[in-house]
């Protein structure tokens, strides 16, 4: 199977679905990540913090935009390698991008047509405004790009149409409080990332320049993926909402649902402690 992720910023792919990608890569699937912006301005902690020091490191405070972008790209490349992303495509648009752009939609469509993915993963398109509209804009453009790639015609465009079979929307910030939402978090499928949680931590540890390394990585995975794991009945999970409904010949229940034991679910769920298993390196 071929997977394509489409996200606004360099670290989004890892925080939203890094564990899922690691599992697919391990299963032999082909994973490509398309990242719309260079992320030079977003979470530029390494540079802002240096200015607060009494004797700032000259090489850090004198870094220009290109140097900052290059540094983050290096972090991204290491993280991608850890989770098994085979191809990394960075469009390097400015990360102040807050609205929809026809030319970016066209770029996305071209990459979708070139990659011919079975599955696309992107942000839930209705992130709350406070999580930055860049994510909403990225997802709106991703969905528009997928649709546009579906309308390519060999006669007119010199390339065939692309039929993406499913889009999985990640739900980091989705808290739709409708009657069907479980504790305010609504997903319609979970991936158990417990077997690869070490890789998600290691990949987040790569993003030291934006403060994601160390305690933050462990806390985010413990809390966010831990809460989704609680709902999923495993230690750590990533949650998704499917864009297209699934068609089956019969109503089915999953292996996980068959194996679930409600009596010990909470015990199993609490088994692992990330901070003990993966201590933050001091120094
Ligand atoms: Zn982001």
Image: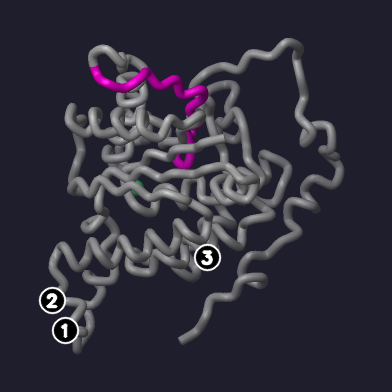
C-beta proximity under 8 Å, tags 2 and 3: no
- Mark 1, ligand 1, within 8 Å: the answer is no
Task: Give the alpha-carbon distance from disc 3 to disc 1, as whole Å.
Answer: 29 Å
Residue at point 56%, 16% (across, down)? 245
Q: Report the residue marked by disc 1.
A: 58
Q: Nearer the viewer, residue 78 or 138?
A: 78
* Element class at badge 3: helix
- The colour scheme of the drawn protein is one colour
Task: Give the alpha-carbon distance from disc 1 to disc 2, as whole Å.
Answer: 6 Å
Within-10-Å neighbours for mark 3: few <14, some 14–19, many 20+: some
Residue at point 19%, 41% (across, down)? 97
C-beta proximity under 8 Å, tags 1 and 2: yes
Residue at point 18%, 81% (across, down)? 59
Is tag 3's residue or tag 1's residue first in the polypeptide sequence? Answer: 1
Q: Give the residues drawn in magenta, as a range.
A: 157-175
C-beta proximity under 8 Å, tags 3 and 1: no
């Amino acid at each position: 199977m071929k997977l394509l992720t489409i996200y606004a910023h360099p670290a989004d792919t890892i925080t939203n679905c890094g564990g899922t990608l690691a599992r697919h890569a391990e299963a032999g699937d082909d994973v490509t990540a398309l990242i719309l912006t260079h992320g030079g301005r977003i979470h530029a902690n390494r540079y802002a913090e240096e200015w607060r020091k009494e004797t700032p490191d000259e090489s850090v405070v004198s870094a220009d935009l290109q140097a900052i972008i290059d540094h983050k790209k290096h972090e991204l490349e290491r993280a991608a390698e850890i989770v098994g992303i085979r191809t990394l495509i960075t469009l390097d648009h400015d990360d102040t991008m807050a609205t929809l752009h026809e030319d970016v939609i066209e770029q996305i469509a071209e990459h979708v047509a070139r990659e011919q993915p079975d599955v696309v993963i992107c942000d839930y398109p209705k992130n709350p405004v406070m999580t930055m509209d860049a994510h909403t804009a990225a997802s709106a453009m991703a969905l528009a790009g997928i649709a546009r790639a579906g309308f390519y015609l060999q006669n007119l465009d010199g390339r065939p149409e692309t039929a993406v079979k499913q889009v999985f929307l990640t739900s980091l910030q989705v808290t739709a409080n409708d009657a069907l939402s479980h504790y305010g978090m609504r997903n319609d499928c979970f991936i158990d990332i417990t077997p690869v949680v070490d890789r998600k931590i290691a990949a987040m540890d790569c993003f030291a320049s934006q403060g994601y390394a160390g305690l933050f990585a462990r806390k985010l995975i413990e809390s966010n993926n831990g809460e989704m794991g609680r709902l999923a009945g495993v230690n750590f999970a990533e949650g998704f909402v499917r864009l297209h409904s699934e068609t089956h010949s019969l109503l089915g229940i999953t292996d996980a649902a068959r194996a679930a034991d409600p009596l010990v679910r909470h015990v199993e769920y609490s088994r692992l402690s990330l901070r003990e298993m993966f201590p933050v390196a001091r120094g």
